[in-house]
Image (cartoon, rainbow, N blue to C red):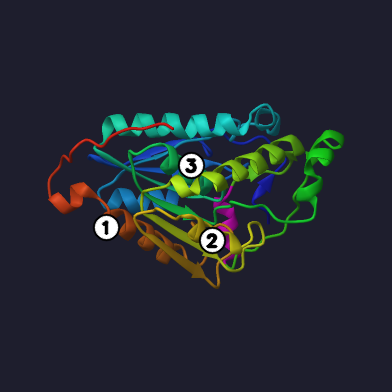
Amino acid sequence: MTARTLEPFDPATVAPWRLGRGRRGALLIHGFASTPPEMRRLGDHLAARGWRVFGPALAGHGTTPEDLEATTWHDWVGTAQDALDELAVECDEVMVAGQSMGGTLALHLAATDLRVRAVAALAAPVRLSGFLQHLLPVFASAVRWYYPGDDIDLWDVTAVDELHSYGRRATRSILELKRLVAAVRDELAQVRAPVLVLHGERDRTIDPRNAGEIERRLLDSAAVVRRMFPRSGHALTVDVDRVAVKEAVSDWFDRYSVTARLGVSRAPAVAHLIS
């Protein structure tokens, strides 16, 4: 059983999705080499609680590894920003949640766009670990493909069926991920929105110590809460603590929703800034 495939994706399975109605928006961003379905459970939960939810596919994702190889981290940021812009047209306030690299992108959006009302970062990296990280620029110039294998850190191993990701990743793409992570790490002090940081302690993909580093670097955030899940692996949205994760995210978004506090269907406009 594996979450990764060397076969082409079924476009219908990995397609972007939209759920819910109303003027409160939630943007849900998937992770590196992955696809929108990994965020669908959270999307269903938020839609049932009155949110308009969008799960886009990042540039180069959900098609072929060659497509991912042809993109840069700026392309992934561009997709996330376009999705935020699109959702903001339909909504009076927008929250952003992301899994893994999607969480890093969510933090980037919060650092650069004041329309982001609140953030939930799930298993988000701001520093990659492993001995190859220091050699990655050289490695990427010599070896084109990396095959991550079938290691599964999920407590609920059946949940892997909800994940769809590339079974091979270009080393060039991994280098782009490293560049994104470094850029966002330096941006964290710019984040003003409240941030919920969630991480599984059994995560073997992204070191759980990233959660503590994010918390420490969010110097000017309106509020920061870090919560660790001892049983969960990397894919928090589908693993054994998925119900608690969904509740934590939706409660966080509700807490900082102006619309919910005012008890009206339309909230005041929020300023937009790109730095």
Can residue 208 be seen here? The reply is no
The amino acid beneath tag 2 is: Ala
Q: Which residue does the image show at 36% across and 29% down from the upper left?
A: 86
Q: Main secondary structure of the magenta part?
A: helix
Q: Depth check: 106 or 186 in front?
A: 186
Q: Does the magenta-highlighted stretch encompass residue 159?
A: yes
Instruction: Return the residue found at the far right.
Output: 142
Q: Depth check: 177 or 264 in front?
A: 177
Q: Quick check: 260 above or below 23?
A: below
In the picture, the disc for residue 108 is: 3
Q: Which residue does the image show at 55% across and 65% down from the upper left?
A: 200
Q: Mark 2 points at which residue?
A: 211
The amino acid beneath tag 3 is: His
Q: Does the magenta-highlighted stretch encompass residue 150?
A: no
In the picture, the disc for residue 99 is: none
Residue 95 placement, left or right of 186: left
The x and y percentages for residue 62 are 58, 35
Q: In which quarter of the image is residue 68?
A: top right
Q: Mark 1 points at which residue?
A: 255
The amino acid beneath tag 1 is: Arg
Crowding at label 3, few (<14), some or many (≥20) Cα neighbours within 10 Å?
A: many
Q: Give the range drawn in magenta.
A: 156-163
Assign the N terminus to one quadrant of the image: bottom right
Q: Tag 2's secondary structure? A: helix
Q: Which residue does the image show at 59% across and 56% down from the upper left?
A: 160
